[in-house]
Amino acid sequence: MLQWRDRSPQHWHELVNHEVCVTNRDQQRFEGRVFTVDPVSASVVLLSVQESERLSVRVILGHAVTDVQILRRGTEETERQMKSVLLPDRAQSLSAEELKSRRESVRLWLEQNRVPVTEDGEVLRVANALTISAPYRPGDCSSANEIILSRVQSLVESNDEKIRGHLRS
């Protein structure tokens, strides 16, 4: 039988959203719904609801996992509930038209602020030093240069504030 860490990422991915019982080297058992499995460390992220209706997130380190048993299969509804609790609102799906509108708004705002920006498919590229992915919010900016990252994130945030201000008016 394969050790937990030797299993394929595909096998781990198949456990996502299922309610499982994870046993570690010390024979401790942890029950919960699999949110994800880290493909590098094989660590399992379990979600469970405590008696007080509080969400508990537990990470069982991959090197300590000895067995994982599926207790109940997940459904689309449980997957949606997990994502709505943990993922920020921006990660919830926007229509293709809304994404296109946001991308265009951010691109125009950056150009108005004299920032060199180009479109590369669904991604905005700033001076070949930064990318902005959908849904084009400050947290979607990525760059190795922290100064550029910070400044562009501030501009994207000010664009979001400008849009919210227009919506209130």
Image (cartoon, rainbow, N blue to C red):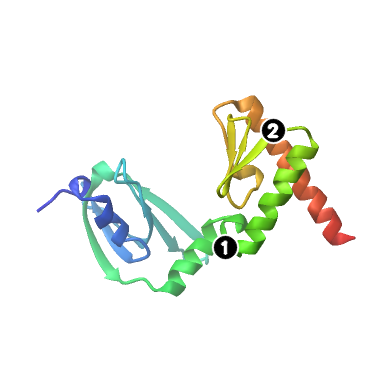
As helix, strand or loop, the secondary structure at mark 2 comes to loop
**Residue 68 picture quarter:** bottom left
Is residue 63 or residue 144 the one in the foreground?
144
Seen in the picture, residue 51 relative to 88 is either above or below; the reply is: below
| Residue bearing mark 1 | 93
Q: Is residue 58 visible?
A: yes
- Amino acid under label 1? Ser
As helix, strand or loop, the secondary structure at mark 1 comes to loop
The x, y position of residue 57, in whole percent, is: 44, 54
The residue lying furthest to the left in this view is: 1
The x, y position of residue 112, in whole percent, is: 80, 39
- Amino acid under label 2? Pro
Proximity of marks 2 and 1: CB atoms separated by less than 8 Å: no
Q: Left or right: 162 with respect to 125?
A: right
Task: Point out the image quarter for the C terminus.
Answer: bottom right
Q: Earlier in the sequence, mark 2 or mark 1?
A: 1
Is residue 25 or residue 160 the one in the foreground?
160
Q: Residue at x 31, y 57 (%)?
A: 13
Tell which tag, 2 or 1, sits nearer the viewer.
2
**Residue 168 picture quarter:** bottom right
Q: Is residue 51 visible?
A: no
Q: Residue at x 61, y 55 (%)?
A: 90
| Residue bearing mark 2 | 116
Q: Badge 1: how crowded within 10 Å, few (<14), some, or many (20+)?
A: few
Q: Badge 2: how crowded within 10 Å, few (<14), some, or many (20+)?
A: few
Is residue 114 or residue 130 the one in the foreground?
114
Q: Of the numbered discs in the image, which one, if any, rests on residue 70?
A: none
Q: Left or right: 69 with respect to 140?
A: left
The x, y position of residue 3, in whole percent, is: 16, 48
- What is the C-alpha distance between the residues marked 2 and 1? 28 Å
Q: Residue at x 74, y 39 (%)?
A: 110
The x, y position of residue 36, in whole percent, is: 38, 54
